[in-house]
Amino acid sequence: MKVLLIGGTGTISGEISKLLLQQGHELWMVNRGKRNVPEGTHLIQADIHTPEGEETITKAISGVHFDSVADFIAYHVPDVERDHKLFAGKTAQYIFISSASVYHKPLGNYLVDEGTTLANPYWKYAQEKIRVERHLMKLYRETGFPVTIVRPSHTYNETKVPLCLQGTKGCWQVLKRMLDGKPVIIPGDGTSLWTMTDSRDFAPGFVGLMGNIHAIGEAVQITGDETLNWNQIYKSIAYALGVELKPYYVATQFLTDCAYYDLNGLWGDKVNSIVFNNAKLKSLVPGYHSEIRFDQGVRRSVAYILEHSELQVPDPEFDEWCDRVIAAQEEALKRVKEACQ
């Protein structure tokens, strides 16, 4: 296949790029060039979000036809309107990366598949993805633009440890609290169900949809098959660090009410119990199944982060906020107990 990735070096797309090249496909990539791209990639160095970038891309793909184009950095309707203008008639398939956060919140049923209603009143990110999905499917119905929509859930790679709650600078400060023996905040009571997906499991499912005529006009979720609760997830992380987990449970409403940054992604995604039914993906990509258990995948992530100091980004603001939240709840509990005596 001749494939074009817009982005191509991120958490999800980086592993897809590697797999495409390993399988012998011709890989093109639109990228700003701030990260290294895999050897053998036809790089179009441009910022697609600028008029100059669009002009560069238009010239670079003149006379070229792709089997599949996938945009990993489209978030709003104008982004895909631009893509439609650039690639209509130039690709047999256009893949939009949406999100499993688009599914109805609160869920009427914990078991989720592609037929689950799309509605998320809590999180603007998910609302924008829903708008884009609807716009693209309208284009498909009315013009035949060959759309495939992919919905990842919580996907991670070796450079990050996936968490329910972290600050604005990544996962390191939570890992540091674990290493320092400090309590780690887990929203709710940690028993809601969740699914993690290693990017090495995501990539074969995604590549299996590329150039797949049966995926045109379809939305397909790609997630791991393993279901965990947040207590199990955090215990696996602590075990990988070689420390004892000290969980501290705080109500989600309390956290969102006193947060110094936007935590709507909790209500709109992570605190909802979800189990994904991946039957549709497996019917479109025969033989596909996820292979990497979370405890295995997160060991790789933890080891990689501990070996790479540039990923150990301190977040003192988040650390101090955690301490204040814990102190405030402890004080409230103390006063209630005293009042009840």
Image (cartoon, rainbow, N blue to C red):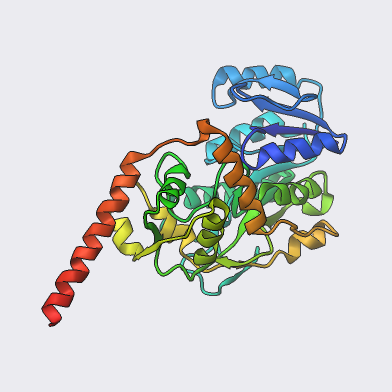
Q: Residue at x 46, y 43 (%)?
A: 172
User: On screen, 301 above or below 2?
Assistant: below
Q: Position of residue 301 (x, y in %)?
A: 60, 45
166 to the left or right of 68: left
Coordinates of residue 77 in the picture (x, y in percent): 54, 41
Q: Is residue 224 left or right of residue 162?
A: right
Across and down, in percent, residue 275 comes to 61, 68
Quarter assignment of residue 315: top left
Q: Decide: is 204 above or below 11.
A: below
Front in this rendered view, residue 276 or 148? 276
Does any portion of residue 74 appear in the rendered image?
A: no
Task: Give percent across and percent down for residue 67.
Answer: 82, 37
- Left or right relative to 44: residue 326: left
Q: Residue at x 32, y 52 (%)?
A: 322
Residue furthest to the bottom in view is 341
Q: Is residue 334 left or right of residue 283?
A: left
Quarter of the N terminus within the rendering = top right
Looking at the image, how many numbered discs can be counted on the residues? 0
Specify the quadrant that holds the C terminus.
bottom left
Find residue 74 and report its image quarter: top right
In which quarter of the view is residue 291 placed? bottom right
The residue located at (79%, 30%) in the rendering is 27
Q: Identify which residue, 335 or 81, lies in the foreground.
A: 335
Residue 321 seen: yes
Identified at 45% across, 58% down, the residue is 268
